[in-house]
Amino acid sequence: MSLRNTISSKYIGLAPVFILSVAVFAGLSSHVSAQSPVSSADNFSVGCSVDSNANTVSVTLASVPVFQAIYLRSQPNQTISPTMILFQSFATGQCINLGTSTPKTSIWTQIDSSLTPKQLSAGGTFMATSQTVGSAPYESALEILLLPDASTCKPTSTCQTSYHGWQGALDPTIISGATDQIAVYVAEPIVSSRLNIVNYYDNQVFLYSKPNLVAIDNDYLSGGENVLTAVANFKNGEQFVSTKYVNMGPDYSDYYWLRSSLYRSGGRAVFILKMAGFVAVLILLLLLVRHSHNKRLYKLEHGLKGYRGHSKEENTPKDKPISG
């Protein structure tokens, strides 16, 4: 056997061992990567790797506004456990650990984050990972609230704030899809937002609309206690909702009820009043015409044609004798 054949035989015999070694190394590398979650100390890393034993839900957004604070809450059907929020940017591909929080049902909880992204407007993917998070078809498992300005509102069960002296709740806009695993909301400062219209309600019954948020007109209120709600609609899609309680006192004579019914009917009442006035004037004119006609007939029937200023020509004989 030649030396060349001997060397070839050795390498051929080592080939299966080499291939097996590469496969084992690749499997171990993949396992280590999957088991290495992003730590809070390492806020930035390339790509997002999470614990394979944990559950993960995500949402991808084409654009994410700059924000100063981030809040989290869970849906009623979720089991609560510590949840880590990650974000992977389209622009850099980096995975950003935004922090970890234990969400509460229907209550906003701020994420304890040592990092606030300066610019995420290029869009990316939010991921939430925990031992218990899960999603049902066509509904979100978690909700995220982004505040571009941390002083916009105070998130509790709602986003509490004030507007033109009114205390109420800011209803933020949603920037995620209806069926995404994570619902993402943005609460913009309403002080700088353009107001569209304000609708007023009493016990959820519509009263009227105004271009600005002003004091409620008591003429629209009936007796007793009234639950008044003002809903300010802004051009960016946000709503500010404020509720007040006004007690008008007892209404023994039904005065408040009659007055409020008249005002609440709005344009219909004005139309009805105008039509009633028109009909009244028409009836009055018909009565006057009929009275004048009856008076004339009475004079003719009783030979009083010359009565009260009748023409002298009618009393003068038309055929006079010719003299001379």
Image: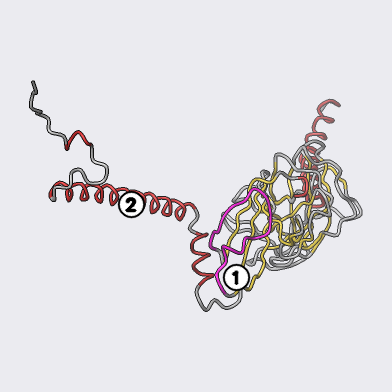
How many other residues sit within 10 Å of disc 2, few (<14), some (14-19) or many (≥20)? few
Q: Which residue is mark 2?
A: 284
Question: Height in image: 29 above or below 108?
Answer: above
Residue 47, image x, y percentages: 80, 44
Q: Which residue is mark 1?
A: 226
Look at the numbered disc 1 and give the secondary structure of its residue: strand
Residue 101, image x, y percentages: 80, 62
Residue 151, image x, y percentages: 83, 54
- Amino acid, disc 1: Asn
Q: Is residue 142 one of those drawn in magenta? A: no
**For the magenta stretch, what is the residue range?**
205-223
Q: Is residue 210 one of those drawn in magenta? A: yes
Check the image and tell me how it is coloured.
secondary structure
Residue at left offset 62%, top offset 65%: 228
Viewer-closest of 99 and 53? 99
Q: CA distance from mark 1 to mark 2?
A: 43 Å
Q: Residue furthest top?
A: 324
Viewer-closest of 251 and 283? 283
**What is the quadrant of the N terminus in the image?**
top right
Viewer-closest of 317 and 129? 317
Look at the numbered disc 2 and give the secondary structure of its residue: helix
